[in-house]
Each structure stands twice: as C-alpha cells, then as structure tokens.
Amino acid sequence: MILPTQATVSPGRRRRLARLAEQTRANPPADLAAAIRNDLGVNLSARYGGLSLPHPFGKASGQLSTTILQVEADAAAGIAFVVLKTVIAEDESGHRAMEAWTVRETRMKVEKRRSAGGREGWTVTWKGRGWHGSLAEYREFFERSLAVARGRDVPVIPSVKYHLPQGGEPFREEEYRHTTQTLLDVWNRAGCGGPMLLEKDFSPTLAGDDRAKQRDSILRWLFEVPHLIQAAAPGRTRVGMKLMNALFDDRFQVEMVRAALPAHPAFLVVFNRLFDPEWKVAFGGYDLSDRNLRVLDALLALPDASLPPLCATGNICSGRMMVEYALRGAESGQVHTFFQVPLSEYTATGGSRTARALHTLMLHPDEGLVMWLWHLNEHNLLPERSGEIRFLDLVTEE
Ligand SMILES: Cc1cc2nc3c(=O)[nH]c(=O)nc-3n(C[C@H](O)[C@H](O)[C@H](O)COP(=O)(O)O)c2cc1C
C-alpha cells in the first residue's frame, strides 16, 4: 500500500491530538505511549525480537549509544529499546580479525539529502566504523547499561561485528565463541534471565569492502553466521541479523534475505544504510527507505514468503514512515538520524533530544504515528478492536 501525501482524519480527532501534543510539548513524559492510549484510544504496543514494547521506536546501534549517559538519558526519555554501538569480536588473546573496523570516530555531519526520486530527507555523514575500544571495555559498558536501563524496564541489546571471511577462508570460530560467551556472562550476572538478544551487524562499510565484492561470500556469511553464534552458546542467544544494503540490485537483496532464513535467526533488522563507493561514505534519507520498502515489497510478493519477525531501520524520521515499514511486516523500528536533526524539526519544545524526537514521531499533526493510524482506521484499513486502535494490527492479522 502506498500512503497518500496527507492523512485525512476527522476534525474531532485532530483536536484531541493537538490537545495532548500541547499538554506534553514542554516536557514530554517517559510514558507518552500510555497517555496516548488513555487519552486517544490508540495502543502503540510493539515488539522487538519477541519482547513487548510500549511503542515501536528504539535507538539504533551507533554513535548515540556509545556511553552510559546516552543510555541513561534514553531510558529516562522513554525509548522502547537501545541497541548499543557495535563491538568488534575478539578471541581470548584479544585478536580481532575485523580490526580495521575499530577506527576512531570523526565528527558527524547532519545534512539534507535529495533522493534520486527528488524527496528531501536527512542523512548523517560520518567516516567511522565500530566501537573503537576493546571487548573488555565493551563488557563493562554493557553491564552498566543494563543496570541503568533496568529500573525503567528498557531492553538493552549488544551488537557485534564478528569475523567474516573472504573467499573460502574459514570463519574464526574462536572469536565467535569468546565474544558471545563474554557478553552472555554479563547478561547472566545481571540476572536478566532467558536467552540474550544480540544483533549481528553487517554494516554499509562492509558493503563497500573488498570482502563483499563476491556475491557468493555474502550469501555464505548470511547462511553460516547465525549458526556460528548459536553454536557459541547453544540455546542461550536470540540472534537478530542486521542486514546491510549490498552494492548489488534489489533482486540480490531479496536473495540475501532468503539466504539468511534457513539458519532461523530470531529476527531480522532491515536494512542498514546505503554505501556510496565513490565518496566512500554510508548514507540514508529517502534513497534508503525507498530501497528498503521496495525490497520488502518484493519479499512479501514471493509465493513462499515466510519471514522471521522484522525490525525496520532506515529514514524513520516520522510516524508515517514507521507505518510504511509496519505495513510490510516490521513490528518496531530503530532510529539514528532523526535523533540528530535540528531541534526546530521537533514538535516538543523541552526535554532531551530523545524525548522531543519521540514526541514528534508519535504526535506530529501531519506526519505522526497516531495520525496515520487514525487515517488507516478512517479508511477501513485498520479496524478498532475492544475500543482501541492497535499499531500491531498493521503487522499481525489475527
Ligand atoms: C553515525 C552512524 C554510526 C552508525 N554505527 C552503527 C554501528 O556501529 N552498528 C550498526 O549496526 N549500525 C550503525 N549505524 C546504522 C544505524 O544503526 C541505522 O541502522 C541507520 O543509520 C539507519 O537508520 P537512520 O536512517 O535512522 O539513521 C550507524 C549510523 C550512523 C548514522
């Protein structure tokens, strides 16, 4: 389904939304989703890797989840989940086959970007890669992050870049084992219980790397990697594969997803940023969401389409974009760029950046999630159930 340019919603509903937006604008509460449910009858509950969430918006792995202060502020603002910056896997002796991904960050630049289709969006230009520190440092970061987020019941998820071999080279299984077990040890000691959720990052810089030039190599990684992580700690992890956008066409992107399925990843994150091989930078904006939505459409059109749960990423700068992804199966979304746009883009006038961004994603009068769920309801595409409209009904038909 392609959403129209503007949501058409009854004036009464618009007024109720404006009232709640106004009441919460100066200091958006951490439980904004609960206020939306009570006042507006819209249930934003979502899911990530099998976990229930109060709303679909989480923090994507990256530069905004590298410090305890960031995690603490996000939890206080009511983020749905936080994926920590990607750590580079190590073996017991500290050796890292993907060492080249540990470079220190440069300054990030938030820029407008016009897509091939002519729409202006936002992108963050940055020439960094993974977590620059060691696994030991990350372990401490993970432990402290779990501790600060637990009081608010906000899931914290580690992200890892494990070894990806070139050609027929073997996988360095010792790095898989040591890294997974190190993180699991933190998870268990924190008393989290149950299997540990974990994202495996296939990043855009990887897409531009020599090792990703061979289609066969990429397909081999996608098939083998979930097995290797699962084998490192049988039955104790739930692995989400965050897939890159490879430098090949949409058809190959579909093939990549299909290659990942036989290993039964717990969920997929679809899809990380595009890579510009000429400028050697990753980018986002509408080129990214157009591509991601197109590929998801192609996947859904397959006769045997049976996908694991999906979490979307890519240009989620509005509730409307979250709806576009949900209509293609995403139960939640992870956001990076929208937390970095100028403050004037937000509907809230107070609170942390995260709180202001969440307020905008949910309550924007034209682009917000509530407005678009109401639009679908008023066009008979999202029926009310037990007196409320539910975000997850976009994804799951019961
Ligand atoms: C500066 C920057 C650093 C990032 N670092 C990582 C990373 O370490 N691991 C990862 O999985 N994704 C990383 N990403 C990708 C984001 O998590 C996100 O999936 C992507 O930017 C698309 O979302 P967006 O359009 O909201 O930015 C990074 C993105 C940016 C902009």
Image: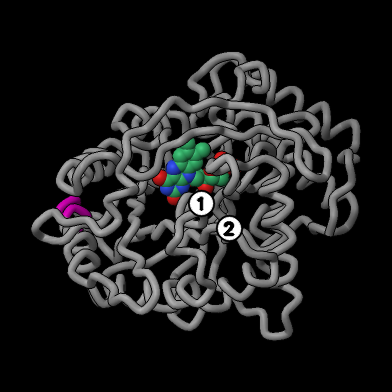
Q: Dot 2: what SS?
A: loop
Whether residue 187 is in magenta: the answer is yes
Question: Residue 88, how many percent across, how many down?
Answer: 29, 52
Q: Is residue 50 visible?
A: no
| Residue indicated by mark 1 | 204
Q: Residues within 10 Å of mark 1 (few under 14, many from 20)?
A: many
**Side (left or right) of 217 relative to 137:** right
Q: Along the line of sight, which residue is nearer the eye, 31 or 106?
A: 106
Q: Main secondary structure of the magenta part?
A: helix
Q: Is mark 1 within 8 Å of ligand 1?
A: yes
Q: Are marks 2 and 1 in contact (CB under 8 Å)?
A: yes
Question: Residue 175, how many percent across, how many down?
Answer: 21, 64
Q: Along the line of sight, which residue is nearer the eye, 292 or 395?
A: 292
- Residue under the point 79% across and 44% down: 116
Question: Residue 299, how many percent across, how many down?
Answer: 69, 72
Q: Quadrant of the N terminus?
A: bottom right
| Residue indicated by mark 2 | 245
**Side (left or right) of 90 relative to 54:** left
- Residue under the point 49% across and 33% down: 126
Q: Quadrant of the C terminus?
A: bottom right
Q: Which residues are magenta?
A: 186-190
**Side (left or right) of 64 relative to 354:** left
- Which badge, 2 or 1, comes first in the chain's sequence? 1
- Residue under the point 67% across and 40% down: 285
Given the image, on which type of amino acid does mark 2 rest?
Answer: Asn
Given the image, on which type of amino acid does mark 1 rest?
Answer: Pro
Q: Would you place residue 274 above or below residue 242 in this image?
A: above
